[in-house]
Amino acid sequence: MENSFEHYIEGAPDYALLTVKIPSGKTLNVEASAMATMDTNLKMKTKLKGGFGRFLTGESIFINDFTAENGDAEIKIAPASPGDLVHYKLNGNETLYLQSSGYVASAPTVKVDSKWQGFKGFFSGESLFLAQCTGTGDLWFNSFGGIIEIDVKDSYVVDTGNIVAFTGGLSYRVTRFGGYKSLFFSGEGLVCKFSGEGKVWIQTRKASPMASWAYPFRPEGKNN
């Protein structure tokens, strides 16, 4: 099928590794620094999604183009965070939004760009922009922890730190969970309220609580 790549995923859901076979003359877009192994006939070119102005504010995504020359090739892709990996097929009539760190790879017919969240993203404590994916073809994204797909029929609430992706048919707004005391002392805080009909993918772990849990075990420097 056009815009489809033969692929398989190993190590899921804990440490997923993606292998994609690229036909001769074809190109695969891959998150920068995610290449683990590749055939020697793959040629790489780097491009910036979002523009240089957004790069200066940390709102761009670097993507490497891998093109198979003089024969078919294979590439293994290792996402930065330990967790699950999902394959999704865009049909040309839909949009998928990813947390900026969730993008892994896509067909060249999938357009990836940044979408400003405004103050919704600022107050959520998460990234200030989303990866907006449109077009036709294969798309892969990953998480920190396992991934669970949820069908939203009317409304649904997700902690901002657990969102991995959602379909463009959903509207959303970020709001606090409970009062101001809950916001600062409960360990909960801000949530995303989705409405409409579509899908949401959530991750089973959040990076910030993990970092807090690991902090007491950090090595401490010795005073001379």
Image: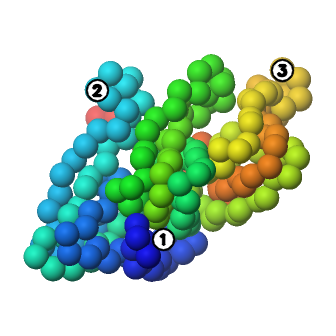
Residue at image point 20% right, 75% down: 24
Which residue, given by chain and number where applicable, does mark 3 sit on?
180
Which residue, given by chain and number where applicable, does mark 2 sit on?
52
Of marks 3 and 1, which one's residue comes earlier in the chain?
1
* Image coloring type: rainbow
Q: Quadrant of residue 47?
A: top left
Judged left or right of residue 80, residue 12 is right
Judged left or right of residue 148, residue 49 is left
Residue type at the position of mark 3: Tyr
Determine the CA span between mark 2 and mark 3: 38 Å
User: If the image is split into quadrants, where does the N terminus sit?
Assistant: bottom left
Q: Position of residue 167 (x, y in %)?
A: 66, 49
Q: Position of residue 175 (x, y in %)?
A: 78, 27
Q: Position of residue 44 (x, y in %)?
A: 17, 57
As helix, strand or loop, the secondary structure at mark 2 comes to: helix
Can you tell which mark lies on residue 115? Answer: none
Q: Would you say residue 211 is visible in this rendering?
A: no
Residue type at the position of mark 1: Ala
As helix, strand or loop, the secondary structure at mark 1 comes to: loop
Residue at image point 53% right, 54% down: 92
Residue at image point 62% right, 19% down: 119
Which residue, given by chain and number where applicable, does mark 1 sit on?
16
Q: Nearer the viewer, mark 3 or mark 1?
A: 1
Of marks 1 and 2, which one's residue comes earlier in the chain?
1
